[in-house]
Each structure stands twice: as structure tokens, then as C-alpha cells.
Image: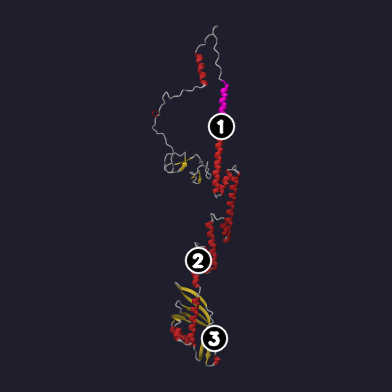
Amino acid sequence: MAIIKCPECGHQISDKAPTCPYCGVEIAGKIVKCPDCGEIYFSDEELCPHCLRPTRPHSHPNATNEDIPTPSSEEVSPAIVSPTETTVKENKASQAVPPTIPTKKSKQAPPTPPAKKKASKTAILVSFVIALLVFGVCYYMYNQAQENRENEEYEIAMRSNEPLILQGYLDSFKDAPQEHRDSIEAHLKAIKQADLDWTNALVSNSKAALMDYLNKYPGTPHRQLAMHKIDSIDWAQSNNINTPEAYQTYMTDHPDGDHYDEAEELMKKLKAQDVTPEEKLLVTNVFHNFFVAINEKDEEALKNTVAEEMTLLNKENATKGDVVDMMDKLYKEGIVRMVWRLPGNYDIKKREVADDRYELNVSFSANQDVEFIESAKNGTNKFKVNATINPDGKISLFKMIKIVE
């Protein structure tokens, strides 16, 4: 037995199947294989539909009766004359010869005895037995063909996952062996249950339900779609959390995921916003040096903490000289000493301004202790500071507002 393509509908079937289970066309004994191109087609077609080779050789159209050899007289068989023809001839002969008048001395010839009926009955009996044998052989061959067809259709159905094919077997072979029908019914029930489980897992929109389905049916044809659905669910969860750790988890679970590149990019951006311990230390040192320089009225030290151009208070494009002027204005007349204290409550935001270059936006509070010549004026002032440190570690923006209590 071989699996071929049905010449009528193109489905894969057995070359021993009496009919195609899909379109119903007769197969066994009705098809032929072209010896030139290998095409399978119906044997009643005169030419191969693929290479046009004649299906069977024909006699030459110009042949005449003279080309047909005539058997010699020695080869001619003697004619067989039936008993009826013999009797007719004998009757004619008897009518042609005038009857002989019997004399006293002559005796009348005895009549020809009739054919015995026993031989006729024997011939009828033999014919009946032969007919009975032929019928028995044909019936056996028919039953054998039906059994072979049932076995072939059973094997095809058991290899199939199509409910229509399985139900078609049950409808076509109601007298099939019970074990075959039981196997087909169990197979059909399992397929229907798998389809129901897949529908429930799909509409649940649950990763756990989809994973349970894949574990239960590892060879399912829906595996790729289920994995795509799980990928979408995990990606939506990572987006909602929106942390580097969440995106890293997605990338680990889905190395070939649909959103792998996007997750990697977002993770890098979020990590770029994370302030490193080194950056926190930079902020602390820069503003410590800035305010210590003011306390000590150290102009050079103060200039070293700021950029060449910056936004200072409400002035844009301010210079280092403008920063020194600000320090001088802080020391009003009568001030003997000034001390700035920083609680260290820095709120740092990180922003990428170029490839691997970041600026740090910082908000914090600063306390100013002031001593006057007249001690009665001594006091402490509180300020809210907003500042920016550029990628070179210099203050590029400095704004300070006094907090009135």
C-alpha cells in the first residue's frame, strides 16, 4: 500500500482505497501511474494529463484484413454440431428418401432412442455448482475488499486529528470491528476535549491557563499561538511595572520575544535615570565646596565649582564673575561671619543629554547662620535650592529662594 494524491480532489489517500474518503471517486483499479513522468491519473483517460503519453497502445489505423494472418486448414478446429442440428438434418434426410414398403420378410428398423435426460440433469447440476462456486468466490473477494478498505480507512483515521475524518469513518463503517469503533470514538472524544481546553485557555487571557494547556498537550498545533499569547501577557505586565528589573525578567523569559528589543531599550533608559553612588557623591562634594567657598570668601574656589556660562538666580548666560558678585552681595553690611549648613536632603534627577553623558538636577535645602556686629541681629535663614550639575561636574544652574516662616 502506498499513499498517493487523489487525481480528483488532490487529498492524500491510499492507492488501495476503493473510493476517496474526501470526494467519493473510485480509486482501486481505476487509476494508473504514467511510466514516463510518474503522474497518477484515471485509467480510462487516453493520454497522461501531464506528459500526454498514450495510456495504452492502439492498432495502426491503416491495417487491413490482408494483414491479418489466416489460419491453415490444419489449424482449423472441427465444427461442433449441436444435438438439435443433428436431429434436424436427420429428419430432413428421412424426408428426402421415400419410405421403404416393408415386405413380409423384412422387418421395420427400430426408432432412434431419445437423448437421455440424465445427461441434461447432470449438466444443469454442474452449472449450478459452478455458479455457486463463482458466487462464493466473488462474495469472499467482496468481503475481503471491504475488510481491507475498512482497515485502511481505520489507519488513516487514527493518524488524523480532523474530527470530520473520524466521524466519516464511524458513519461509513457501522459494522466495523467494535475495537476499531471504540478506538475511533475515543480518539474523536480526545480531540474534541483538546479543542475545548484550547478555547477555554485562549479566552481566559491567563498565562497560567495557557501554560497548563501546553503542559497537557505538548504536541498541540496551537503551541506557537499559545506562546505568542503568553509573550503578550508578560510584555503587558512588564510595561505596567516599568522597572529595569521587570524588563530584565521579560527578556530572560522570552529571549526570542516579540518585544525583546523594546524591553532592552526601555531598560537602558530606566537604568540611565538611576543615580549611581558615584553621582550622589559628586553632588555632595560639588555643593559642599560651593558653600564652603562662600563661607570663606574664597573666590577661586567658588569659580572652580561653576561652569563658564550658567543660569544664576534669574540671570541667564551668567559668568563666573557674576557668581563672585552674588557672594559679595550675601555679605551685607554689619555681617561678621556667615556659615552655610547643608542637611544633605538631596533629591536628584538624572537626564541623558548625549550618548553616555548625563546632567543631574538637584533640589535640596540650605541653612544660613549669620553673625552680625550687633549680636541682636544674629539669626538663621532657610533656603530652597534648585541646581543643575552638567556632565563635566560643574554647576550650570543655581537658583535659591528664601523660606519665610
Q: Say which amino acid is labelled 2.
A: Ala
* Mark 2 or 1, nearer chain start: 1
* Mark 1 or 3, nearer chain start: 1
Q: In the figure, 188 relative to 268: above or below?
A: above
Name the residue: 57% across, 26% down.
Answer: 124
Magenta residues span 116-131
Give how far across and how far down residue 314 sits, in percent. Answer: 48, 81
Q: Is residue 260 visible?
A: yes
Name the residue: 58% across, 22% down.
Answer: 118
Residues at circles 1 and 3 in contact by the CB criterion of under 8 Å: no
Q: In the figure, 177 relative to 320: above or below?
A: above
Q: In the figure, 342 relative to 179: above or below?
A: below
Instruction: State how far apart marks 2 and 1 are (Cα).
Output: 81 Å
Q: In the shown orientation, is residue 69 left or right of residue 202? A: left
Identify the residue position indicated by label 2 in the image: 263
Q: Judging from the image, what secondary structure is the residue with disc 2 in? A: helix
Quick one: quadrant of the C terminus? bottom right
Identify the residue position indicated by label 3 in the image: 381
Q: Judging from the image, what secondary structure is the residue with disc 3 in? A: strand
In the image, farthest residue toward the bottom: 374
Identify the residue position indicated by label 1 in the image: 133
Callout in the foreground (1, 3): 1
Q: Is residue 366 magenta?
A: no
Instruction: State how far apart marks 3 and 2 are (Cα).
Output: 48 Å
Instruction: State how far apart marks 1 and 3 are (Cα).
Output: 127 Å
